[in-house]
Image (cartoon, coloured by chain):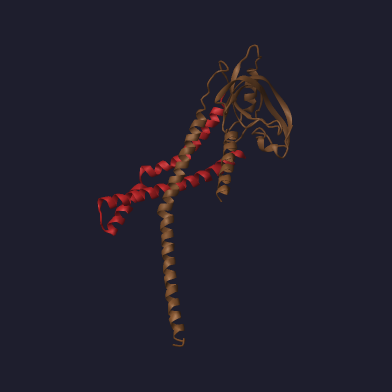
Amino acid sequence: MGLVKLVVFGFLFLSVIYLSISVYSRSVRREKLEKQWDADNPGGEQADRDTYVEQGMAKYESGFRKKLIVLVYIVPTVAIVAILYLTNAN
Amino acid sequence: MRYVRMTFRIVTVILLGSLLHYVLPQHDIARVTSTEVIRTDFSGFNRWFYAQADSGNTELSTRDLRLINTDRQKTFLLGFIPRDATGVMVYRNEDSGWIWPPYFKFDSSDLQAEAASLVSTAAEPQWVVVTHYGWRNRFFSIYPNAVGIRPVEGPDVRVIPWFNISFFIFLIVAWLFLRAAWAQFRERSLDPMMDKASHQMDEVNAGLSERRSRLRRWLDTWRRK
């Protein structure tokens, strides 16, 4: 069945993209927090820096930006439905 | 080594380019002259250039193939420059199905009916835009697959390939993202790991040479002074 294959492999493929974007986004966020701290507190305590970064990351994990990555699943699905409609509607 | 790399690059570009040229939609301005169905026995090679049987049907090694015969406006440079000449073009009309290429086309019969209703003569031409993908090759007996047909005013209409434009923009964005992600991965994960590893190597080497010098000193004690 073509549709089953499309759904299964499409889901796997998009999951790979989803995971890599999550890892990338998390990494960028952490780097930004570290740089922010270094700019605000030159020569600050390492322990304080760690708490600051961890707090920022916790905020990111529950924030809206992280949820935006779900679009990786939504956009292709919408695109497929749109193509399906445009190709087959008279 | 430089030549190997260059050859590899050129081959990659050619392969990717032809894949995109085969799969992306193109628009031809044509006049439908007739539609027909022929029985087709695929060979092992040209089977690659056909889709499968209609999506609800079963796949056999031989089947009927819908064709749309047209008289087409010729062009230069992938359709960017129009020419003042026409030539025949034959399109196949097959369901592309769910997987590849991702046109999700299931309406071949309807499309055949549309094409049949747009048949016209040279004296009273009804021009149409045929959206299609694929190649025509006489030696391998392969045809581009028509995906859509719509009537237009005349043979001089300008078709803007919106899909291809957005596709290439998407491709560039995806490429930039991949590069940024790779740079980030290198900076944050790979390089620190390598630093750590090379630091460890240094320590091991230092330990080794320390031990060796001890051994040397011990050996030296046996030498005649």
Q: Percent x, y for residue A68? A: 40, 41
Question: In the image shown, does B199 or A34 lie closer to the viewer?
Answer: B199
Left or right, residue B58 beside residue B210: right
The chain whose colour is brown is B
Q: Position of residue B93 (x, y in %)?
A: 65, 28
Instruction: Locate residue B12 relative to residue A46 in the image: left or right.
Output: right
The residue located at (47%, 35%) in the rendering is B169
Count of numbered tags = 0
Up-down relation of residue A16 to residue B52 (above or below): below
**Which residue appears at 48% of the width and 36% of the height?**
B170
Q: Residue furthest front?
A: B225
Q: Colour of chain A?
A: red
- The answer to whether residue B71 of the structure is visible from this angle is no
The answer to whether B179 is drawn above or below residue B161 in the figure is below
Quadrant containing the C terminus of chain B is bottom left
Q: Residue at x 44, y 55 (%)?
A: B190
Asked which quadrant contains residue A2, the reply is: top right
Whether residue B54 is visible to the viewer of this picture, yes or no, is: yes
Across and down, in percent, residue B27 comes to 57, 26
What is the x, y in percent for residue A6? 57, 40
B187 above or below B56? below
**Which one is in front, B113 or B188?**
B188
Q: Nearer the viewer, residue A19 or B4?
A: B4
Q: Residue at the far bottom: name it.
A: B224
Q: Quadrant of residue B142?
A: top right
Residue placed most toward the observer, B108 or B45: B45
